[in-house]
Amino acid sequence: MEKLKQNPIVKKLGLNRILLVCVLILMFLVFKVVLGNKFPAVDSIRSTLNYVYFLGFLSLGVTFVIATGGIDFSIGPVMFCCALVSGYCMTSYKVPCAVAMILCILIGLCFGIFNGWMVSYMSVPPFIISMASMNIAKGIASVFTKTQSVSWPAASEANGWFRNIVSVNGFPVGIIIFLGMAVICGIVLYNTKPGRYILCLGSNKEAVRLSGVNTKKWEMLAYVICGFLVGIAALFFVATYTTVQPGYGDQYNNEAIAGCVMGGTSMVGGLASIGGTVIGVFIISLLQQGIMAFGLGKGQQMIITGIIVIVAVYIDVSARRRKN
């Protein structure tokens, strides 16, 4: 194992990422062999990508928050709030599609600013403020839409051009946008001063503060980035699935966090892997497609996702103990 870790290619790519890719390939092969025609390769890949689009942006966003040692359980409901409010403005108030898309991102950004301000400047525990924001997001969406579902324009309709962010003539443009954003997030997190401070906050916030760094500003920035990416996730969700209903979104919190932790982001902060998060998202998305192909319901899906979170966190904690 030590020789394998010292291999130049393994050191470059990371052993954890290589193992995750192997798990992803193995999962696909197992589902294909066990399920056969119930798991058609092309359709399954397409469905997995559709799930990756919005879940990927949620996971990228919450990676920044977890890197600081914080947490955000509001990302799923906030994503739905963004999609519902902006979509309702377009369908009921005839707001242009482009304006609705910008509004969608701005709503996510506002929640990110709110969460970041409360955590960093008002010293409210991240768990508490994220749970409060989750309820606020659900409430705003329900009140604004009068508890009605909202359907964004179909591809054949006048404003349906926005669906090109996901697919153009069958070509998955969405995956290019997602991977491009992942590269940008990686550059920000590893090669810029804000990113390095965000990681340092998770390692030892007090030491960073005593060194003269404005920890509140950089901690808030992590939540702002998360809110911005949640707004983008909402756009990809409606570009893929069209209809959004108030009161939903909670289930995507665990899935996004599971993708992060599985990819190597530590729940106690200080360590994050954007590349690992990307692979983790693909694993979670493929797993969801496999679960549905087996005919299991949403309840079983939530149980399995919860178990994955527990296992991933346990592995992270065990690795930390061994390292210490």
Image: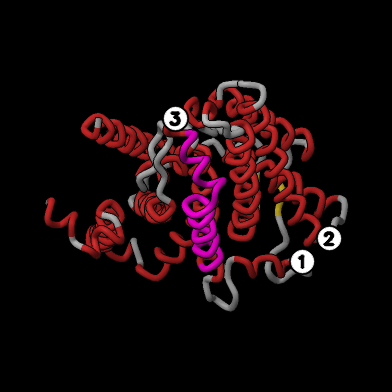
* Residue range (magenta): 176-201
Query: Dot 1 lies on which element?
Result: loop
- Amino acid found under the numbered disc labelled 1: Asn
Question: What is the basis of the colouring in this image?
Answer: secondary structure
* Rendering coords of residue 226 (x, y %): 59, 44
Let me know if residue 107 appears in the view.
yes
Disc 1 from disc 3: Cα separation: 48 Å
Please name whichever residue, 164 or 19, is drawn nearer the observer in this view of the structure. Answer: 19
Residue at 56% from the left image edge and 65% from the top image edge: 177
Q: Contact (CB < 8 A) between labels 3 and 2?
A: no
**According to the image, label 1 marks what residue?**
159
Residue 199 lies within the magenta run: yes
**According to the image, label 3 marks what residue?**
204
Residue at 73% from the left image edge and 44% from the top image edge: 107
Vertical arrangement, residue 169 with respect to residue 166, above or below: below
**According to the image, label 2 marks what residue?**
96
Residue at 58% from the left image edge and 78% from the top image edge: 169
- Amino acid found under the numbered disc labelled 3: Asn
